[in-house]
Amino acid sequence: MKKFIPYLLFSATTLHTVLGVSPVMAMGCSSHSDKAEVVCEEGDTDCEEKISASTIN
């Protein structure tokens, strides 16, 4: 048991260091390249406002 504790501490600190330093990349739904194009009817201001708001964000 005394030989096991140093290995356990070493592996725990190594794992903590690796996970703490590695960068995390979170990508939202807007990063998909195959988006469906929304077509609004002529004069439909609500639809046009939603599209302009979604392209800004």
Image (spheres, helix red, strand yellow):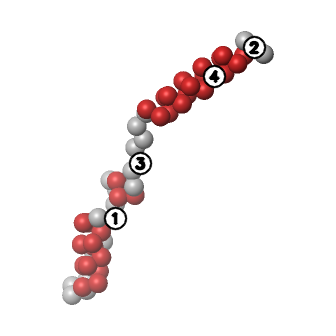
Label 1 or label 3, whichever comes before in sequence order = 3
The amino acid type, in three-letter code, at marker 4 is Leu
The residue labelled by disc 2 is 2
User: What is the spatial separation of the Cα atoms under label 2 and label 3, in whole angstroms?
Assistant: 41 Å
User: What is the spatial separation of the Cα atoms under label 1 and label 4, in whole angstroms?
Assistant: 51 Å
Vertical side of 3 occupied by 18: above or below: below
- Residue 51 position in % (x across, y down): 27, 73
- Residue 38 position in % (x across, y down): 30, 71
The residue labelled by disc 4 is 9
The amino acid type, in three-letter code, at marker 2 is Lys
* Residue in the foreground of this view, choosing between 36 and 46: 46
- Would you say the residues marked 2 and 1 are in contact, meaning their CB atoms lie under 8 Å apart? no
Label 2 or label 4, whichever comes before in sequence order = 2
The residue labelled by disc 1 is 36
* Residue in the foreground of this view, choosing between 14 and 34: 14
Residue positioned most to the bottom: 43
Vertical side of 22 occupied by 3: above or below: above
* Residue in the foreground of this view, choosing between 41 and 30: 30
Residue at image position (66%, 16%) is 6
The residue labelled by disc 3 is 26
Q: From the viewer's perspective, is the residue at label 1 or at label 4 nearer?
A: 4
Label 2 or label 3, whichever comes before in sequence order = 2
Q: Quadrant of residue 44?
A: bottom left
